[in-house]
Amino acid sequence: MTCTNSIHVADEGTVFEVTITDCDENGDAVVVDLSTATVIEFVFVLPSLRVKRRTGTVSTPPGTDGKCRYVAAPGDLSEAGTWKLQVRVGFPSGVWRTEETTFPVELPIEPLHYFDPETGAATAAAPIVAAS
């Protein structure tokens, strides 16, 4: 089986990591030091065009390597389709945004809602049962 980094609806714990860069006077990409950042915000635009804003953190304090991250919480990855991501970073001297990137979110193969025939109740996801 080939290794892929698929993201699925209802995944939890997916790490979104971005290295913030800027262009120097020669047009070369240089890492932005995030050690003095006052805000790191991950802005997600869903396929439905709804916007989710999530607070990010530096990946490796103090942040001099320019890497920041957000770890998806329950309910974050709520729609299948093409998502957009842009990181907004604030410093005492101003606020900047990264270039946007896109990524696919796929549907999982199991149903996202489970109907329990014994109780008639619907749950948010199929129960996880240990293999016997």
Image (spheres, rainbow, N blue to C red):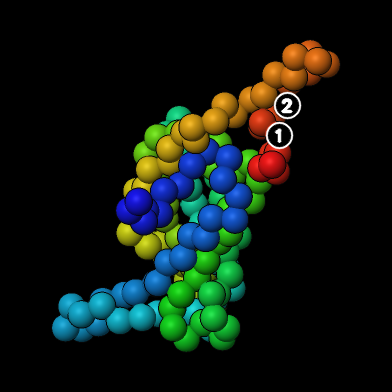
The structure residue drawn at horizontal position 52% and vertical position 66%, both measured from the top left corner, is 69
Q: Is 14 drawn above or below residue 30 in the view shown?
A: above
Is residue 114 visible to us here? yes
**Mark in front: 2 vs 1:** 1
**Relative depth, front residue between 119 and 87:** 119
Q: Amino acid at mark 1?
A: Pro
Is residue 49 visible to us here? no
Dot 1 corresponds to which residue?
127
Q: Quadrant of the C terminus?
A: top right
- In the displayed structure, does residue 39 sit left or right of residue 18? right
- In the displayed structure, does residue 115 sit left or right of residue 119? left
The structure residue drawn at horizontal position 41% and vertical position 62%, both measured from the top left corner, is 97
Q: Position of residue 56 (x, y in %)?
A: 57, 64
The structure residue drawn at horizontal position 16% and vertical position 83%, both measured from the top left corner, is 26
Q: Amino acid at mark 2?
A: Thr
Q: Is 21 drawn above or below residue 123 in the view shown?
A: below
Mark 2 in CB contact with mark 1 (< 8 angstroms): yes
Q: Position of residue 73 (x, y in %)?
A: 64, 51
Q: Secondary structure at mark 1?
A: loop
Which residue ends up furthest to the right in the rendered image? 119
* Residue 125 occupies quadrant: top right
- In the displayed structure, does residue 78 sit left or right of residue 102? right
